[in-house]
Image (cartoon, helix red, strand yellow):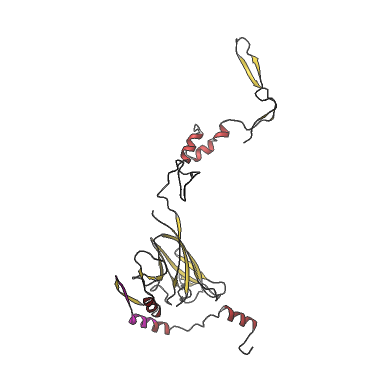
Amino acid sequence: MQDRISTYPGRVTLTPVPGQSNTYDMTRADDPSQPGTPLNKATFLKDATAALYGLGADAVPDEVLSILSSVALHKSSPSNGLYDLSGALITGLPVIQTVTGSYIGTGTYGSGNPNRIATALHPVLAFIRPMLRNNIYFHHTILAKGMNYAVSWTSGAPRGGWLQVEFEDNAVSWFAVDGTWDGISYGTGDPDAEDQLNVSGRTYNYVILGYKGG
Amino acid sequence: MYIDPNTRCNQSTPAPGLLELTPEQEAVYLAHNGFVRVVSTDPVVIEADTEVWEAWKAAEAEKPVVEPAPTADELVDILLGVTDNG
């Protein structure tokens, strides 16, 4: 938006209206070097913008600001969290948190021996890796809610592994499968504890992203 | 270490329903590949599920032996052609 820059600020020309006493047409005569942004409807609230908020062409900017007040961050929030424009903490919104930890592999694998990490959060994403990286064949994986299968992989292995994954309300579990669908093998071979990230005695780190409540 | 009494899975972070093991119980758990029975939850008492563990080990023994993967150092030696004889 631009200001109007006048050579003669406030100067106008008054022209008498013929036949009407004490009535004049007023024309700006400030000779602007920059005319400035016009103060009209399109500047303050376009019809298309009003429509984004479900408002009609007769809406005024204040109606949009009223809607935004329910979702805007208060500019002087006293601490972490979401605050409305009155400064009140907004509660009930899910806030993503993380849990970091480890488990020790037991050597088991397969559908009868799934791995499972329980958490007080509602998990949505899990990163799992071996604590040590002293062997390029150690598998890693990323598990995401809504994706029932995942791969475990490493930079040096001749093959990866397939995992069947389940996200529960307060846990994520997975087990290695042989990668055969509809009678077609995808060449991952027999599943094992390496595929499942559960090699006996090996420590695995995990980071789980999830939310509380809701 | 915490374990899930139902799945026998372990983890370092607490969560509802998990049982915390003592270092001695943790050793028993790991020595038996996680095949333990929860005898009591308060106090936590576990014991090795020897029968299931032996059956699992026997089943594993029947599977083809897979060559252990070389460590990163061993792999470097292989690529460089280094042998024990120098």
- Name the image quarter holding residue A211: bottom left
| Viewer-closest of A65 and B25 | B25
User: How far from the left and from the top, in percent, is residue A67?
Assistant: 46, 39
| Viewer-closest of A80 and B56 | A80
Q: Identify which residue is drawn at 42% across, 82% down.
A: B60
Quick one: quadrant of the C terminus of chain B? bottom right
| Viewer-closest of A73 and A24 | A73
Q: Identify which residue is drawn at 65% across, 15% down.
A: A15
Position of residue A197 relative to residue A12, above or below, is: below
- Name the image quarter holding residue B55: bottom left
User: How far from the left and from the top, in percent, is residue A39?
Assistant: 59, 30
Judged from this view, the residue extending furthest toward the bottom is B85
Figure label count = 0
Q: Is residue B54 magenta?
A: yes
Quick one: quadrant of the N terminus of chain B? bottom left
User: How far from the left and from the top, in percent, is residue A97?
Assistant: 45, 58
User: How far from the left and from the top, in percent, is residue A189?
Assistant: 49, 76
| Viewer-closest of A144 and B50 | B50
Report the side of B86 relative to A108 (left or right): right
Position of residue A118 relative to residue B77, above or below, is: above
Q: Identify which residue is drawn at 46% across, 66% down.
A: A149
Position of residue A96 relative to residue B42, above or below, is: above
- Provide the residue span drawn in magenta: B42-56
